[in-house]
Image: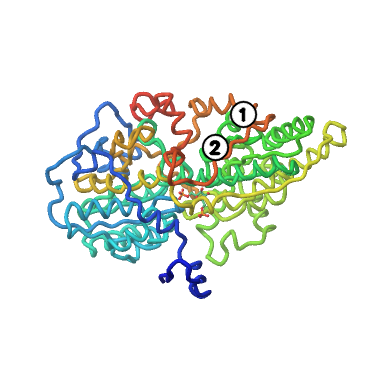
Amino acid sequence: MEAKTKAPGQLLEPQTIIAGLLQESPICGERRAYQPPLCPSLQGLGATRPLDGAELEVLKVAREQLPFVSQNKLLEVVPAQGRPLWDGPRNIGVVLSGGPAPGGHNVIAGLFEAAKRAHPENRVLGFLAGPKGIITNKHVEVTGEMVARYKNSGGFHMLGTGREKIDTPQKMEQCRQTCAVQKLSGLVVVGGDDSNTNSAFLAENMRDLGVQVVGIPKTIDGDLQVPGLCQIPFGYHSACLAFATEIGNLNSDCKSDLKYWHFNRLMGRSASHIALEVAFQTHPNVILIGEEIEERELTIHNVVRLIADVVVARANLGKNYGTILIPEGILEFIHEINALIIKISHIIAVYNREAHEEEFFHKLTFEDQVQLIDNNDIWRDYDSRVFLGLPPELQRGLLLPRDSHGNFQYSLVNTERILLGMVATYLRKQRSKGIYKGAFRTQNHFYGYDGRGTFPTKFDCDYTYNLGQAAFSLLANGATGYMAAIRDLHLPLEEWRPIGIPLAPLMHLEERTARLELVIQKQKVDLGSPAFKILERERQKWAMEDDYRFPGPIQFHGASAEDKPITLMLNALGGRSDPEGGSQGSRAR
Ligand code: FBP
């Protein structure tokens, strides 16, 4: 609805004012008007050629399960004026998969606009509600009007998303039928590690139909990286900045009324990449990094002590306030807790496989669940002792249902509240011994789903638009079983280099639902990376001095609009964008 305007001096009717105030927010219209630029290699139709200087190793089991796509070699997309392999009109499917990440709509925009530029009769079909949309053939045709409406917006609501795993021959056959019925030549899967695992198997299983599959690296968690080739998945920057805005605000609040300790849990299922970036953005008093906790073999009581020591030391300076960052996935890195998670996941999977749906593990009472675990052969007395020594909230958390891929759902456990309670108990003891004399008033917060739905930063808008175009170039030049990526993201966009990374070498074996499965390996925080080394150097100062940093809200104009993730920039200083220079597992050899 358009709000009517009057000539200067004329008063507007209240109804007109109300209508104006209830219209879409001005920022939505502003963001839609932004047209992301393309890097030079994607400005024409784009050709592909082998990327020399980097060899990727494929595990034997991946070669056996993915014999065709395992043969793929690295590709780079280079400028080309001629026509690509796809000459006539084609149908391309696209699916948004897994948790939302800011920028997903721009992948579709990039794909759609590249497809239309190559041939005006090319069609893009968007599958609805994630991979389930492919299985059930639920889709919409993406139109120019839809693209214009969703460009540069957050969320995945243009098509919806879901976590369905294509893990049975029956579901794979349904996907094949959908692609055949829709006469698809290509399918683009926008997803994280599990969704790109789907991509690899779809590519392998649909090659006889002539359907090519290309994945896109998405996840706010930041763990879908390929050292030297894919520095960061999309969505990470935007989510981190959204979280950092909140933490910066808390820094400002706690420094003002000097009253509260804020325990903040930050989303990110496993690796601590998000917490690391938010720490650089905000300089909190305490930052926990799961990977470091694992390396130092800290127990949960050590972690509590680590936080409490800072609280006590600051209290001695008269500072009874501060901010603490706790990565959502921290439990995975505390050895004795992770051992329980692995065993319980195994017991649940084996039990559910044989149980009727109404008797599934999560439908039992807590007492029956504990009994069932206790009776299992893999559960030892030591496990029981550890389990029973944990706070009841954590015990219940460990028994929560796993997701469709068999993952433990860290986002459902209030780890910040649990740690807060344990720290409070420890401090009470310290007080009774006369060691702690401060005031421990607290607030706890969880930042996760909010940041996942934020507007994408300019960096993520440009990155995703180029990824969508790169995916089209890869498909149009015959690639399948690849993940589109952009190298050298730390450099100006004019120097970005689109590539195709074969999916098979990214896979390793992992226990999921009580079976060893071939899945894409997550990349954890590299404790040898420049970013982590700099954090180690700085955090002592952040603990005691109030060296808070205030990033403010995401900006689309001015100097801050050009920001990129601080961790990305720090790691690039260490020369890690060079394929030979990767230190973390050195995938590119
Ligand atoms: P993806 O790996 O699919 O990108 O999802 C990541 C994530 O946002 C995690 O950070 C979080 O633990 C999880 O999804 C939450 O899952 P759900 O949306 O199913 O609650």
The residue drawn where x is 32% and y is 59% is 147
Picture coordinates of residue 383 (x, y %)?
66, 42
> How is the rendered protein coloured?
rainbow
Asked if residue 220 lies left or right of residue 117, the reply is: right
Asked if residue 403 lies left or right of residue 149, the reply is: right
As helix, strand or loop, the secondary structure at mark 2 comes to: helix
Q: Out of 389 and 222, give the one closest to the viewer.
A: 222
The residue drawn where x is 84% and y is 31% is 435
Residue type for callout 1? Arg
Picture coordinates of residue 404 (x, y %)?
47, 55
Q: Out of 89 and 541, give the one closest to the viewer.
A: 541
Nearest-to-viewer mark from 1 and 2: 2
User: How busy is the neighbourhood of tag 2: few (under 14 within 10 Å), some, or many (20 plus)?
Assistant: many
User: How busy is the neighbourhood of tag 1: few (under 14 within 10 Å), some, or many (20 plus)?
Assistant: some
Picture coordinates of residue 226 (x, y %)?
38, 35
Q: Out of 447 and 134, give the one closest to the viewer.
A: 447
Q: Is residue 118 above or below residue 563?
A: below
Tell me the distance, in whole angstroms, between the alpha carbons under discs 1 and 2. Answer: 13 Å
Q: Out of 439 and 401, give the one closest to the viewer.
A: 439
Q: Which mark is residue 281?
A: 2
Asked if residue 241 lies left or right of residue 114, the reply is: right
Does any atom of ligand 1 lie closer than 8 Å to the CB of label 1? no
The residue drawn where x is 59% and y is 53% is 412
Residue type for callout 2? Gln
As helix, strand or loop, the secondary structure at mark 1 comes to: helix
Q: Which residue is mark 1?
A: 539
Name, please, the residue furthest toward the front.
Answer: 9
